[in-house]
Amino acid sequence: QVQLVESGGGLVQPGGSLRLSCYVSGSIFSIYSMGWYRQAPGKQRELVAGITATTAGTTIYVDSVKGRFTISRDNAKKTLYLQMTSLKPEDTAEYYCNRLDTYYKLPWGQGTQVTVSS
């Protein structure tokens, strides 16, 4: 059974950094284009960053995080990463990982909470 396990969130001051991890068990991780999503209270879940399954690992980012967040993957470890720097209060949200495919998603994990506050 496929399971997504996100970790690495926490409370950080504005300007700080965090590295999120997402371990994908029970599936062939390397064939999936993957993404990090976030959902703030009262808002819809949005795609933050994505990375293709190809060797080149092409990446995409929502404008609000360009230059601050970096998505990467380690296929051998079946793990997706999101390095977040220069964090802002508006980055506060629950962060999730999943396939980039719009229609064929894996079961959502529990997410990891990121809170940016002084």
Image: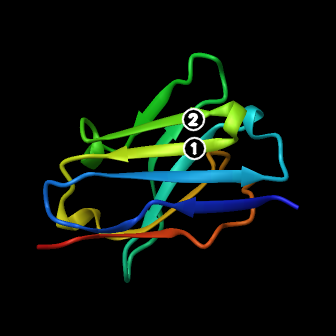
Q: Which residue is mark 2?
A: 73
The 10 Å Cα crowd at callout 2, few under 14, some 14 to 19, many 20 or more, is: many
Q: Which residue is mark 1?
A: 80
Name which residue lies at 37% across and 81% down.
41
Distance in Å between CA atoms under marks 2 and 1: 4 Å
Depth order, front residue of 13/27? 13
On screen, residue 104 above or below 39: above
Q: In the rendered view, how is the structure colored?
A: rainbow
Image position, residue 24 (x, y; %): 71, 51
48 sits left or right of 86 in the view: right
Label placed on residue 26: none
Depth order, front residue of 16/60? 16
- Tell me whether circle 2 and circle 1 mark residues in contact (CB < 8 Å): yes
Q: Secondary structure at mark 2?
A: strand
The disc, 2 or 1, on the residue closer to the chain's N-terminal end is: 2
Residue projecting furthest to the bottom:
42
The 10 Å Cα crowd at callout 1, few under 14, some 14 to 19, many 20 or more, is: many
Image position, residue 69 (x, y; %): 32, 42
Name which residue lies at 52% across and 24% down.
58
Image position, residue 17 (x, y; %): 26, 51
Q: Amino acid at mark 1?
A: Leu
Q: Secondary structure at mark 1?
A: strand
On screen, residue 15 above or below 63: below
Instruction: Give the quadrant of the N terminus.
Output: bottom right
